[in-house]
Amino acid sequence: MGPDLLHLSAAGVSLVLDCRGPGLPSVTHWGAALDDAELSAGLSPATDPQPIGFSVDGTVRPSLIPEQSSGWLGTPGLAGHRDGRAWATAFRVTAIDRADDAVHIRASDAAAGLDLAVDLELHPAGVLRARAAVTATAPGAYWLEHLTLFLPVPERAAELLDFTGHHLRERHPQRTAFTHGLRVRENRTGRTGYDSAYLLCAGTEGFGNRTGEIWALHTAFSGGARSIAERTYHGWSALGGGELLLPGEVSLASGETYQTPWVYAVHSLDGLDGVSSRFHRHLRGRPHHPSKPRPVVVNTWEAVYFDHDLARLSELAKAAAAIGAERFVLDDGWFGSRRDDTSGLGDWFVSPEVWPDGLGPLVDLVRGLGLEFGLWVEPEMISPDSDLARAHPDWIMSTGDRLPRPARHQQVLDLANPAAFEHVLGRLDALLTEYAIAYLKWDHNRDLVEAGHPGTGRAGVHDQTHALYRLLDELRARHPGVEIESCSSGGGRVDLEILERSDRVWASDCIDAHERVAIQRWTSLLLPLELIGSHIGAPESHTTRRSLPLATRAGTAVFGHLGIEWDLTSAPLPELAEWVALYKELRELLHTGTLVHADLTDPAYSVTGVVAADRSDALFALIATATSASYPPGTVGLPGLAEDRTYHVRPQPPGHVADGNAAAWGAALPWCTPQGVRLNGRTLGTVGLRLPVLYPDRVLLVRVSADSAPGRVTE
Ligand code: DGJ
């Protein structure tokens, strides 16, 4: 047994575990850093809840995996049974091991025939992650319904923010009051989902970009998931997360173990920007985080769709090289009978019909132009109209007696079937071996509906998700240099477990800059900009039919991992080249700096910025998505700068410098000139700048460089 109290602390966060036992530890405090002296002064007695009448006798302290036996009457952390028995547990701790800021807890319930293990880690950026595992220790199948981890939050967390969304509008925020009762966000789509809760935030009333105290939780799983916010009348509030299991999906024989996904949690005293900064620092500290400058991508999808033709694609590649792009990605349509989206998935052989000499001529041309070559694949899917489906109809996921309803004319390949898994692995391995492919755009274009193992009919989303992870892990082990993009009909698979084995996400199929302002802002609440694919599209958006100028499309796309998805053979290459050059100049700042957002009351405007880690340089985007009710609009503080440094503030070309200078019918705004203005960081943060009158859907980039900074932008 370990000590009575365990205190993990990092980067201004403390987690205090009450290990007095004999039951599972409970969290006495998760929030702002405490010092050990406060703990020894008796944190638990100070905060223990009072025993109340007409409830269970004694003190109730729900654990990380709350149980009824502890007096908890909210959602149990573990639900399951062995033929109707063993549904209630009373785990007793058998060991608590601590190594630095990681704790491993083991517990057992001999009567229920179950062992439990919980891992808790507090990482240097203050990101906490936890997972649990249950092992059956008695004969007979233990049918697991769910295993969910909970972290308590204080009553002052009065408001919730989580996310919903759909194709072309992923990660749409929704705010509610954190009232008594249970709020469960379930994802049954068999992928992370456009509408995943993403980051479930509980915060003090009115929390904003820079204000308020927030506790946030992310369930890192690419299959079914549940995110929970629960407040009981006993005064307990908690956030929880775990896998959503389908009926009968997991049963444990004696000796078998089920492991939950990791649940990530952060605390912030500085509003949503504080949440992001912890996640971004954590993700950037991973050993496999992309470290090379993020190359400018040209993707063929919205340029040619399925119309693959070597001559046409060669022209596109040459134009890509001319503007300074660095990676050329051949999208859907290169394989099997895939001339449209009705057939061919599963036949991962280059189509002799459209590529009579294979992909070699295009790959050689692209590489000869100095670009990397990337290829689109959708390995988990199978078209009923494909050679693979004709040869192996029994490899299609189903409940056994009927095929699920098709979606985009396709079905799902049962990757938990070893033969199907080996087949796909073999084909991808062969392609990566034959061609110099630096990048796979890994797509997944349907929800999993009635996704069972065809042989048994049993639900298979859990197995499918883990098979996908194994497939990616094996391919990455065999081809370590190859980068992978996680795409799922746009941004349907964005979570921290897929990002353990991919290098960026495709945030949305909507590349209309107006929509992207919100999609990218909210995707970047969790992910740093270098992990978010953002492309400059055609002047008229293919998905919304909105027309926007290049400066708006490019000025938003540079806040990400830049790409271009536009038929370049009819695009203004010199102007595009200027944007590519700007991105290259700024990508180190954008991909290592701190992302900040001003708190504005004017709904027409938003202000996003990236401030260099040493605060010597910053790029801000002043974005108007509508006309303002105020004319001219008010002032805005630029957050994140060093208070005692003097900065040179001026519009960053190219872009709407002229519009920003004298939009519509107004006169020039004094600071909005190439000469700009000099102010110190404190003044910029508090008084700030007068917002220019911008036409709606215009972006004005503003460069803010410390006077002493090397390599300042030239005017
Ligand atoms: C959906 C993706 O999100 C698109 O970018 C594109 O790759 C298509 N699939 C191709 O079918």
Image (cartoon, rainbow, N blue to C red):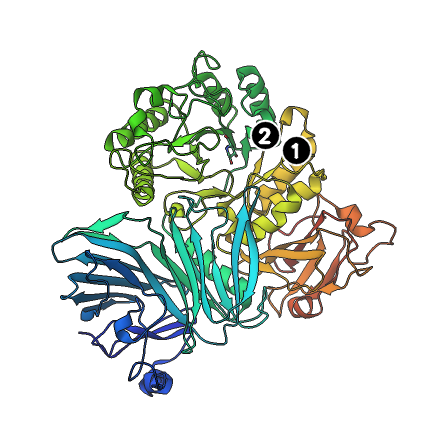
Task: State which tag comes first along the sequence, 2 or 1.
Answer: 2
Residue 284 visible in the shown view: no
For residue 538, which numbered disc appears in the image?
A: 1
Secondary structure found at label 2:
helix
- Could you say where residue 512 lies in the image, as x and y percent from the top left? 64, 41
- Name the residue rendered at 40%, 39% in the picture: 449
In the rendered structure, the answer to whether residue 349 lies left or right of residue 301 reads: left
- Identify the image quadrant of the N terminus: bottom left
- Name the residue rendered at 28%, 67% in the picture: 100
Determine the CA span between mark 2 and mark 1.
8 Å
- Could you say where residue 17 lies in the image, as x and y percent from the top left? 31, 74
Mark 2 highlights which residue?
A: 302
- Name the residue rendered at 56%, 25% in the picture: 305
Give the crowd class for mark 2: few <14, some 14-19, many >=20 residues within 10 Å: some
Is the residue marked 2 within 8 Å of ligand 1, measured from its CB?
yes
In the rendered structure, the answer to whether residue 693 lies left or right of residue 131 reads: right
In the rendered structure, the answer to whether residue 265 lies left or right of residue 713 reads: left
For residue 195, which numbered disc appears in the image?
A: none
109 to 482, vertically: above or below: below
What's the amino acid at mark 1?
Ala
> Mark 2 touching mark 1, by CB under 8 A?
yes
Q: How many marks?
A: 2
Secondary structure found at label 1:
loop
569 to 651, vertically: above or below: above
- Name the residue rendered at 31%, 49% in the picture: 247
What's the amino acid at mark 2?
Glu
Please identify the residue farthest to the left as the structure is shown.
Answer: 139
- Could you say where residue 474 lies in the image, as x and y percent from the top left? 29, 37
Pick the residue in front: 462 or 144. 144
Give the crowd class for mark 1: few <14, some 14-19, many >=20 residues within 10 Å: many
- Could you say where residue 575 lies in the image, as x and y percent from the top left? 69, 35
343 to 139, vertically: above or below: above
